[in-house]
């Protein structure tokens, strides 16, 4: 069974750094793109970027390029989403998702990590 | 970036109804169009990929059609568990953008 298990909810202050994780199991983590999706409170889904764990090839949405860093450690089947300096506007739910189909649809999703940034 | 526009933004329907949701791309995406369902407080769930292919385990009352720029998701015989928000997504080119969603509410 494919599973993506995300790290727990975070409460941070503006300017702090943060790293959230997504651990894959039940499939060949190395061989499939895994991505991150943001959902701000009461809003729609926003595609942030994806990484191919085998070679760490990464693609970002222009909206998130330079704002976050996506990485992966294939040795432990884990993807990461990192901020160096959080803003209040980063408050959102973040989902990881992987695509194992040829057309790149996200067929498996994590349960989400809620990030709250407040002074 | 390819912009995805969904309409309507919300609709009210009754159990047993047939509803059609629309998604339009700002340029051709051939058939690289996916549909997701998201219930409140839950992660999105893939329903349809490649415009018309039903994801494994998804009831056959869900169907998708379209190609190029215009796509539809049809739910026939609406069930109580179908009241949710539906989002389309193009995977023709990165960034793989989502539409803003259509909320299907109980009439």
Image (cartoon, rainbow, N blue to C red):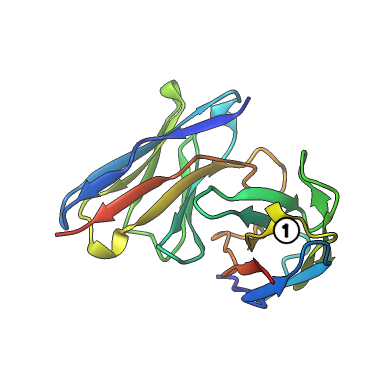
Q: Is residue A28 above or below residue A114?
A: above
Task: Locate residue B26 relative to residue A11 in the image: left or right.
Answer: right
Point 74% across, 52% down: residue: B49
Task: Locate residue B36 relative to residue A111 in the image: left or right.
Answer: right
Point 84% across, 63% down: residue: B65
Tell me the residue that label 1 is attached to. Answer: B32
Report which quarter residue B24 is drawn in: bottom right
Q: Quadrant of the N terminus of chain A?
A: top right
Q: Residue A38 in the image: x percent, y percent?
A: 44, 56
Q: Is residue B84 above or below residue A32?
A: below
Observer-nearest of A57 and B40: B40
Q: Quadrant of the C terminus of chain A?
A: bottom left
| Residue B68 in view, yes or no | no
* Label 1 Cα neighbours within 10 Å, binned few <14 / some 14-19 / many ≥20: many
Task: Locate residue A20 relative to residue A105 in the image: left or right.
Answer: left
Observer-nearest of A11 and A65: A11
């Amino acid at each position: 069974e494919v599973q993506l298990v995300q790290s727990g909810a975070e409460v941070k202050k503006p300017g702090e750094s943060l790293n959230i994780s997504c651990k894959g199991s039940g499939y060949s983590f190395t061989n499939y793109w895994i991505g991150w999706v943001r959902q701000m409170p009461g809003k729609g889904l926003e595609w942030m970027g994806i990484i191919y764990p085998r070679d760490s090839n990464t693609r970002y949405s222009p909206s998130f390029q330079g704002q976050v860093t996506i990485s992966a450690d294939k040795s432990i089947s884990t993807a990461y989403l990192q901020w160096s300096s959080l803003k209040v506007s980063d408050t959102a739910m973040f989902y990881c998702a992987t695509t194992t189909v040829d057309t790149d649809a996200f067929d498996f999703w994590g349960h989400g990590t809620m990030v709250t940034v407040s002074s | 970036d390819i912009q995805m526009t969904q309409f309507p933004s919300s609709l009210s329907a009754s159990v047993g109804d047939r509803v059609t949701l629309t998604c339009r791309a700002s340029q051709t995406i051939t058939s690289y169009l996916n549909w997701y369902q998201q219930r409140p407080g839950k992660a999105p769930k893939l329903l349809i990929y490649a415009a018309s292919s039903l994801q494994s385990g998804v009831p056959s009352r869900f169907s998708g059609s379209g190609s190029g720029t215009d796509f539809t998701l049809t739910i026939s015989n609406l069930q109580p568990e179908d009241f949710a928000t539906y989002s389309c997504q193009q995977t023709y080119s990165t960034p793989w953008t989502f539409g803003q969603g259509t909320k299907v509410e109980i009439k």
